[in-house]
Amino acid sequence: MSDPGPAKSCPICGRPVVDPTHRPFCSARCRQVDLSRWLGEVYRVPAAPSDANGSGSGDDDREE
Ligand SMILES: [Zn+2]
C-alpha cells in the first residue's frame, strides 16, 4: 500500500501540486503570481517615514 500523501492543489490555479519544488504552488509561475499579489498589497500601504534617526541617545562612548 503506497500512500502518495495528501494531494494539495495550487492556491493560484487550483491544479494539483505534483512538483514539490514550488510548494505550495504547482509551478514557479504561480509562485510569482502569488508573490506579485503580495507585493501589490504591500506597495499600496504607505511606508512610514523613518528618516529621523535618534543620534546620541544612550550610546555614550566613554574613555577613562
Ligand atoms: Zn498553479
Image: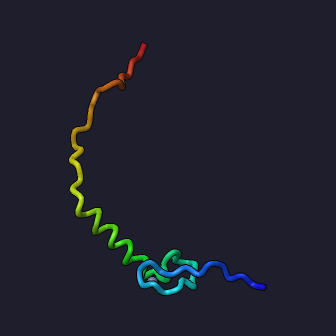
Q: Is residue 9 left or right of residue 6?
A: left
Quarter of the N terminus within the rendering:
bottom right
The residue under the point 50% across, 82% down is: 26
Q: Give the x, y percent position of residue 33.
A: 37, 78
The relative height of residue 16 versus residue 43 in the rendered view (above or below) is: below
Q: Give the x, y percent position of residue 27.
A: 48, 83
Q: Is residue 39 left or right of residue 10?
A: left
Q: How is the image coloured?
A: rainbow
Question: Number of numbered discs present?
Answer: 0
- 43 vs 15, nearest the viewer: 15
- 2 vs 53, nearest the viewer: 2
What is the quadrant of residue 19 in the picture? bottom right
The residue under the point 36% across, 26% down is: 59
Residue extending farthest right = 1
The relative height of residue 6 versus residue 39 in the rendered view (above or below) is: below
- 64 vs 42, nearest the viewer: 42
What is the quadrant of residue 32 in the picture? bottom left
**Ligand 1 in which quarter:** bottom left
Q: Is residue 30 left or right of residue 49?
A: right
Quarter of the C terminus within the rendering:
top left
- 63 vs 43, nearest the viewer: 43
What is the quadrant of residue 63 in the picture? top left
Q: Give the x, y percent position of residue 54.
A: 26, 33
